[in-house]
């Protein structure tokens, strides 16, 4: 599984990820206009569970920069667009 730096724009949501698996959980996600969805994390936030620093972004549109690994985006910085 590789990692790559990315710049993305999209809507932040609270969703259930990995439904039906042992990893099923609620998570803060970024849905891009292209239909991709990433679970959001901050660099210092928890690897599993909801990062409180991101809860305030739910329902907002952001421009995000970070490192994408599979379907997780580790945020380095973000900017509100709405």
Image: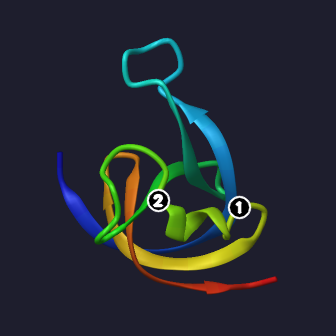
Query: Is 80 left or right of 25, judged from the image as shown?
Result: right
Question: Tag on residue 8?
Answer: none
Q: Where is mark 2, residue-wise? A: 51
Residue 46, image x, y percentages? 33, 55
Residue 28 to residue 68: above or below: above
Point 73% across, 72% down: residue: 61
Circle 2 crowding by C-alpha within 10 Å: few under 14, some 14–19, many from 20: some
Circle 1 crowding by C-alpha within 10 Å: few under 14, some 14–19, many from 20: some
Residue 71, image x, y percentages? 40, 47
Q: Earlier in the sequence, mark 2 or mark 1?
A: 2
Point 67% across, 69% down: residue: 56
Q: Are marks 2 and 1 in contact (CB under 8 Å)?
A: no
Residue 10, image x, y percentages? 66, 66
Q: In terms of depth relative to the viewer, which is nearer, 26 or 33?
A: 26
Query: Is 8 left or right of 2, judged from the image as shown?
Result: right
Query: Quadrant of the rendered structure where residue 60 is?
Result: bottom right
Question: Tag on residue 58?
Answer: 1
Residue 76, image x, y percentages? 37, 80
């Amino acid at each position: 599984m590789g990692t790559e730096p990315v710049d993305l724009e999209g809507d932040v949501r609270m969703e259930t990820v990995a439904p039906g698996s042992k990893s099923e959980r609620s998570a803060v996600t970024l849905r891009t206009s292209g239909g991709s969805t990433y679970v959001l994390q901050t660099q210092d936030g928890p690897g599993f569970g909801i990062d409180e620093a991101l809860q305030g972004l739910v329902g907002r549109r952001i421009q995000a920069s970070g490192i994408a690994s599979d379907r997780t985006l580790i945020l380095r910085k973000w900017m509100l667009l709405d």
